[in-house]
Image (tube, rainbow, N blue to C red):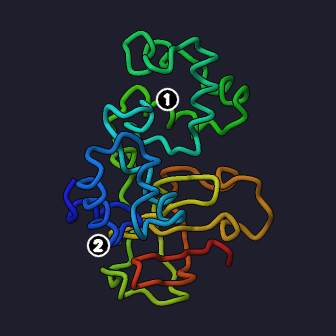
């Protein structure tokens, strides 16, 4: 991808996009998502935010070519083992047929994950080229919010949950990058996992907690 396209990926700034291109020119084609951790200024937080949208086709790990976040790779490994699927053959028609025929509720309980998470994993394995955001409703936007410069701390907005990970949920409020609601800001009570209170596709009311205009990051809260 070009630097201009990379800038549309959640969490990636213009400088980081340029650094990704330079790193690719330096080492040749990326063979794994882990190699992106060596890109200058692409820190751990940015990596967690963007890596589900960066795919490595024909890489060392077949999962790197899917929208599945690396934090879920261990659950995918458990899933394919339960279904007796060769990890190197997860995109074959035989594997897809097994995935289509599982009971989501029973398998989710076995793997100790939420049904929405498992459903997203299965869909990503069956259709590795899909963008899960395409299937979601468009966010309900505040008309006077057009760019990150329009945001102010304390502003109340509505948005669509685009991704749920262990450390929080990413919400589309109409900006270039989805904004993060950290797990500590999802509820007024302790929760073990973000899926306890939100799911992909939910329309939620959020409040702007902090704005980092230099890095293009927005922190949201659902604690009112």
How far across and down, in percent of the image, does residue 208 sit?
53, 81
How far across and down, in percent of the image, does residue 127 sit?
36, 30
Q: In the image, is 223 to the left or to the right of 119?
A: right
- Residue at left 61%, top 18%? 81
Task: Estimate the spatial distance between the alpha carbons at disc 1 and disc 2, rounded to whole Å.
Answer: 33 Å
How far across and down, in percent of the image, does residue 34 sit?
47, 48
Outermost right residue: 190
- Residue at left 44%, top 58%? 38
Where disc 2 sits, the SS reads helix
Residue designated by label 1: 122
Snapshot quadrant of residue 172: bottom left
- Residue at left 63%, top 59%? 167
Q: Residues within 10 Å of mark 1 (few under 14, many from 20)?
A: many
Residue designated by label 2: 14
Front label number (1 vs 2): 2
In-front residue for pair 62/196: 62
50 over 223 or under it: above or below: above
Q: Residues within 10 Å of mark 2 (few under 14, many from 20)?
A: some
Outermost front residue: 26
- Residue at left 54%, top 63%? 44
Q: In the image, is 190 to the left or to the right of 77?
A: right
How far across and down, in percent of the image, does residue 72 sit?
58, 40
172 over 118 or under it: above or below: below
134 over 191 or under it: above or below: above
Where disc 1 sits, the SS reads helix
Snapshot quadrant of residue 188: bottom right
In-front residue for pair 181/95: 95
How many marks can you see? 2
In-front residue for pair 224/16: 16
């Amino acid at each position: 991808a070009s630097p201009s396209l990379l800038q549309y990926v959640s969490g990636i700034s213009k400088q980081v996009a340029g650094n990704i291109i330079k790193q690719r020119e330096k080492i040749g084609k990326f063979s794994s998502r882990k190699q992106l951790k060596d890109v200058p200024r692409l820190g751990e937080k940015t990596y967690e935010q963007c890596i589900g949208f960066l795919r490595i086709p024909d890489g060392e790990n077949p999962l790197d070519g899917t929208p599945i976040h690396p934090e879920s790779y261990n659950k995918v490994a458990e899933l394919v083992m339960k279904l007796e699927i060769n990890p190197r053959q997860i995109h074959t028609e035989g594997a897809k047929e097994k995935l289509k025929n599982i009971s989501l509720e029973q398998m989710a309980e076995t793997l100790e994950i939420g049904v929405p998470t498992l459903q997203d994993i299965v869909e990503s394995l069956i259709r590795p080229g899909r963008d899960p955001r395409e299937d979601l409703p468009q966010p309900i936007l505040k008309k006077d919010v057009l760019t990150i410069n329009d945001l102010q701390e304390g502003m109340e907005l509505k948005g669509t949950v685009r991704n749920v990970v262990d450390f929080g949920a990413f919400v589309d409020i109409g900006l270039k990058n989805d904004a993060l609601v950290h797990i500590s800001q999802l509820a007024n009570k302790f929760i073990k996992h973000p899926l306890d209170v939100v799911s992909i596709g939910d329309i939620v009311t959020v409040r702007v907690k902090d704005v980092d205009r230099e890095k293009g990051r927005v922190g949201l809260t659902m604690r009112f």
